[in-house]
Each structure stands twice: as structure tokens, then as C-alpha cells.
Amino acid sequence: MMTLYGYWRSSASYRVRIALAMKGIEVAHVPVNLRKGEQGEAAHFARNAQGFVPVLELEDSTRLTQSLAILDYLDAIEAEPPLLPGDPILRAKILGAALTIASDVSPIQNLSVLKYIRAEHGCDDAAVTAWCRHWIAKGFNALEEIAQTTETEFLYTDRPACFEICLIPQVYNARRFGVDMDAFPRLSAMDEACRKLPAFIAAAPESQADAV
Ligand SMILES: N[C@@H](CCC(=O)N[C@@H](CS)C(=O)NCC(=O)O)C(=O)O
């Protein structure tokens, strides 16, 4: 069995958990407690030189990092349901929207980034919250604009794909930081629909054994 090193509230771990559940792949879950700083311990750096979760360890001990690369691996070993379609243009559009979250929005709220702006730039709780809200809303504004032009239930498809796997964990974070989701009706509808599906329920932070 493969092992997923993750954290219940980590959005990148949440993405991988959704993909695993959608594909019906069972893994062993090993928590790395980010609040306690376990990602900075030597044991975890040996798994991921960046000190991030998630890490997917294969049966032969090969370790994969970066959630979107892990999703790509899971699509390669288990085709159904596909996380990205075969059509090259649709594929690029879905991946582009997913990367808007995974590359442009999510990293700016990383625990290490927030610790840095607190320690080096004197940001207090209010400033950190304002920072997170600003960058999430900026990304969501662009995605909502795209979503207003498509007629599918989800962004470009009628079932959740790679984009929604990135969106739902980011909406979870948006709520934590008090982003007004009423400003994003299409994204909110996708979030509501996904969170009713068994794979998304199983992968949700509150369903994890290490949730506190
Ligand atoms: N681009 C990476 C991001 C991974 C990442 O940022 N993980 C966060 C949790 S969501 C983390 O481990 N943070 C620990 C820290 O910032 O110290 C991916 O998609 O896997």
C-alpha cells in the first residue's frame, strides 16, 4: 500500500486525498503536524527537501512530491475517473485554472510565508488575515469571471476534475480567512455540489483522523 504524508488542514494534502478517493485508491495516512513544526524535522526533510506536505510514498519507497504532480501520477496509474481530459485545449484550460489556485493563490498563504511576514514585516493577525483575503479574492475574481462564461456544472466539465480538486480546498481556506464567498456565485455552487460527493466528504479536513 502507498503512504500519504499529509496534514488534515493542508490544502495541497486535501487535493491528493480527493483524487485518491475519486479513484478508489486506498493509502496509509501518516500525519505530519504542521502546527507542531514536524515538517521541519530531519525525518520529513528526508521525504521532501522542501519540507512540505504532501508526500506520496510508493510501495517501492519512491517518494513523490508536489500535489499536481501526484495527481498526474494517479491519473497515469488509474485512468478512471480522469482528472484531466484527453482533448488538448480543454486539458490546458482546466490545468490553467487549477494552476491559478495551486501556483498563484495557495503558495502565498503557506504557513511558512505567513510566519515570515509576521516575523520579518511585523504583520499582526489582522494584517495576515487581510493579506490572505486579498490574494484569495484576486484569484477567485479571475476564476469567477471564467466560470460565468461556461455552461457546464463545473468549470469546464459536468463532473469534478483537476480544477475542482484544487478549488474546494481553497474555498475551505477562504472561509477560514473570512472571504465573502457570496461574491463568487459560480465557484460557490461548484463547492456546494462537490462537497456532497462521497470522495470529497471522505477527503475533507474534518473527516481526517488527525483533525483537532
Ligand atoms: N506546491 C506544493 C505546495 C505544498 C505546500 O505548500 N504544502 C504546505 C501545506 S498546504 C506545507 O507543507 N506548508 C508547510 C510550511 O509552510 O511550513 C504542492 O502543491 O504540493
Image (cartoon, rainbow, N blue to C red):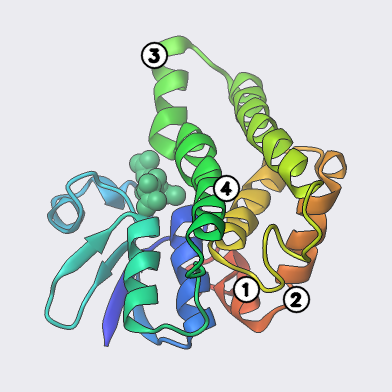
Q: Position of residue 211 (x, y in %)?
A: 53, 66
Q: SS class of the residue under badge 2?
A: loop
Mark drawn on residue 120 = 3
Q: Is residue 96 visible?
A: yes
**Mark 2 vs 4: CB contact within 8 A:** no
Mark 4 is on which residue type?
Ala
Q: Earlier in the sequence, mark 2 or mark 4?
A: 4
User: Ligand 1 closer than 8 Å to the CB at disc 2?
Assistant: no
Work out whether 170 lies above or below 208. Answer: above
**Mark 1 vs 2: CB contact within 8 A:** yes
Q: Position of residue 49 (x, y in %)?
A: 17, 47
Q: SS class of the residue under badge 3?
A: helix
Q: CA distance from mark 4 to mark 3?
A: 32 Å
Mark drawn on residue 24 = none
Mark 1 sits on what residue?
A: 200
Q: Residue at x 18, y 83 (%)?
A: 59
Q: CA distance from mark 2 to mark 4?
A: 22 Å
Q: CA distance from mark 3 to mark 1?
A: 37 Å
Mark 2 sits on what residue?
A: 196
In the rendered view of the protein, which quadrant contains the C terminus? bottom right
Mark 3 is on which residue type?
Glu
Q: Is residue 180 left or right of residue 71?
A: right
User: Ligand 1 closer than 8 Å to the CB at disc 1?
Assistant: no
**Mark 2 vs 3: CB contact within 8 A:** no
Mark 4 sits on what residue?
A: 97
Q: CA distance from mark 1 to mark 2?
A: 7 Å
Could you classify mark 1 by the number of other residues whose Cα lies within 10 Å: few (under 14), some (14-19), or many (20 or more)? Answer: many
Q: Earlier in the sequence, mark 1 or mark 4?
A: 4
Work out whether 94 lies above or below 145. Answer: below
Q: Position of residue 92 (x, y in %)?
A: 49, 52
Q: SS class of the residue under badge 4?
A: helix
Q: How many marks?
A: 4
